[in-house]
Structure formats: structure tokens, C-alpha cells
Image (spheres, grey):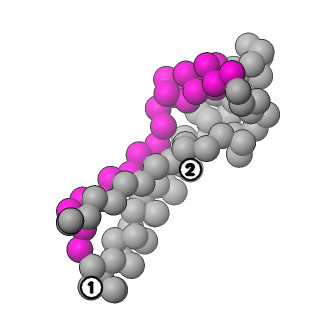
Amino acid sequence: MDQDKADSLLRDFQSQSNLYTRFAESLKHDVLRLLEQNHLTASGIDCRVKTNHGLERKIRHKTDKTYTALRDITDIVGLRIVTYY
């Protein structure tokens, strides 16, 4: 990926990082509520937003992908539900 495009995507991500953080928190809250409503328990629920460094590494080193906008990038927000086996 060319340097200017990568830099532009990283700037866009940094300017929207609060939005991604709020989305991750909202997603976790909604999942917890759904589990509770359905009388289900989980050992743990974690959410995260990709770090600047992680996103930069993904953008610059994924040679099989061409990212033109943030919406093209998967896994910016992640949610993990750990269940009892």
C-alpha cells in the first residue's frame, strides 16, 4: 500500500477511535443484556479496539488486501465470549 494512503487511513482511524471505543462498549453491554435475558452465563466477555500499531501493521503488511477506506478493514473492533464447556 502506498505511504500516503496508509497514513490517511491511520489518521481517519485516530480521529474516529472514540467512536470505535463507544461501539465496543455498547456491543459488550448488548451481549451481556442478551445473555441475561436468555438466562445464559459466560465465563467472560472481552472487547477491544485494535491499537494504532496493530492497525498500521495490518494496513502496511497485508499484501493480499487493498484498503481504500476504514470500512474495508475487518477486525477493528473485536468481541470474545468465553463460555463454560
Which of discs 2 and 1 lies nearer the camera? The answer is: 1
Crowd rating for badge 1 (residues with CA inside 10 Å; few <14, some 14–19, many 20+): few
Q: Which residue is mark 1?
A: 39
Span highlighted in magenta in the image: 41-63
Q: Is residue 14 above or below residue 78?
A: above
Residue 47 disc label: none
Secondary structure beneath disc 1?
A: loop
Left or right? Give the position of 11 relative to 57.
Answer: right
Q: In the rendering, at what x and y percent does residue 52 appear?
A: 51, 28
- Three-letter amino acid code of the residue under disc 2: Leu
Q: Which residue is mark 2?
A: 19
Question: Which numbered disc flags the more N-terminal residue, 2 or 1?
Answer: 2
Q: Give the answer, above or below, for where 74 lies relative to 56.
A: below
Residue type at mark 1: give it: His
Q: Residue at the spot x=77%, y=22% of the render?
A: 5
Residue 59, position as x, y percentages in the image: 64, 25
| Quarter of image, res 13 | top right
**Residue 32 location, x and y as percent?**
34, 71
Q: Residues within 10 Å of mark 2 (few under 14, many from 20)?
A: few
Answer left or right for 2 relative to 55: right
Which residue is rendered at x = 61% and y = 19% of the image? 61
Residue drawn at x 27%, y 85% is 39
Residue 83 within the segment the image draws in magenta: no
| Quadrant of the drawing holding the N terminus | top right
